[in-house]
Image (tube, rainbow, N blue to C red):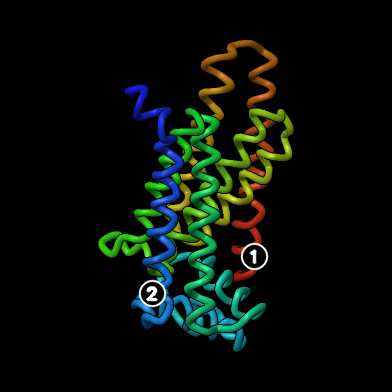
Amino acid sequence: MPKYFKYNFKTENLFLFFCTILFLWIRLHHFNIVLERDEGEYVYAAQEILRGKLPYKDFYNMKFPGVYYFNALIFFLFSDSLSVVKFTLLLLNFCSAFFIYRIACVWYNNQIGKLAAGIFLIFCSCFSAQGWTANAEHFVIFFGTMGIFVAGLFFTKNNILYFFLAGFFLACATICKQQGILFAVFQVIQLILSKTLFQRNRISAISFFKTLAVYVLGFSIPIGLMLIYFY
């Protein structure tokens, strides 16, 4: 990367600042726009849950019910107004951008982290990507990036509790929509690469299976509770 581009004007800081301002400007203009199709589905399902109705019995969809229940929790704590839906999405996107920034900082460097966070905010503002609608994918990305970020703390702090929490959050991503399981599969692949390909000895193998077991336990709790509840 050319020196003038990297250092003179702190281009990555200006880029992130510009993306944040553009993101906020676009989103604030969407606060009063009526709900899109999928947004309406999630809000309706959350309202029905608060009335005592049960997904797949009183209303139907092919998705896992995580988004319904997270929205129901938000509506219970605040209200089911349009502004609450839009503001919740705004917070989810900012939190996801932060996790993406931290992940990129660990994997690459601070400059790449800021560029990645800025690009993510731009995608969250795109009409063609439906970035400004509170679809299930925003919840999946939020919990998915949180899980990968927490898993990274395990590699830096060597505390197995972080991998348990990573499994828990990645299960929440899966509950929001089935495609979220790809985040969980990615984290297992990263664990395999870090524990077996680069540390081929007995201790690392024991550590690998112990960490994997804790990860599976954390992942199983939300999935298991969901299945037991609907059973």
Amino acid type, residue under disc 2 in the picture: His
At x 73% / y 39%, what residue is drawn?
161
Question: Does 199 appear above or below 182?
Answer: above
At x 58% / y 46%, what residue is drawn?
147
Which circle's residue, 2 or 1, is located before the other in the chain? 2
Question: CA gap, disc 2 to disc 1?
Answer: 39 Å
Residue positioned most to the top: 201
Pointer 2 residue: 30
In this rendered view, identify the residue nearer to me: 19 or 53. Answer: 19
User: Residue 33: where, in percent of width, then height?
Assistant: 37, 80
At x 40% / y 50%, what residue is drawn?
120
Residue 220 visible in the shown view:
yes
Residue 226 found in image quarter: bottom right
Pointer 1 residue: 228
Element class at badge 1? helix
Amino acid type, residue under disc 1 in the picture: Ile
Question: Does 174 appear above or below 79?
Answer: above
Question: Does 55 appear above or below 123?
Answer: below
Question: Does 170 appear above or below 124?
Answer: above
The quadrant of the picture occupied by the N terminus is top left
User: Residue 93: where, in percent of width, then height?
Assistant: 48, 58
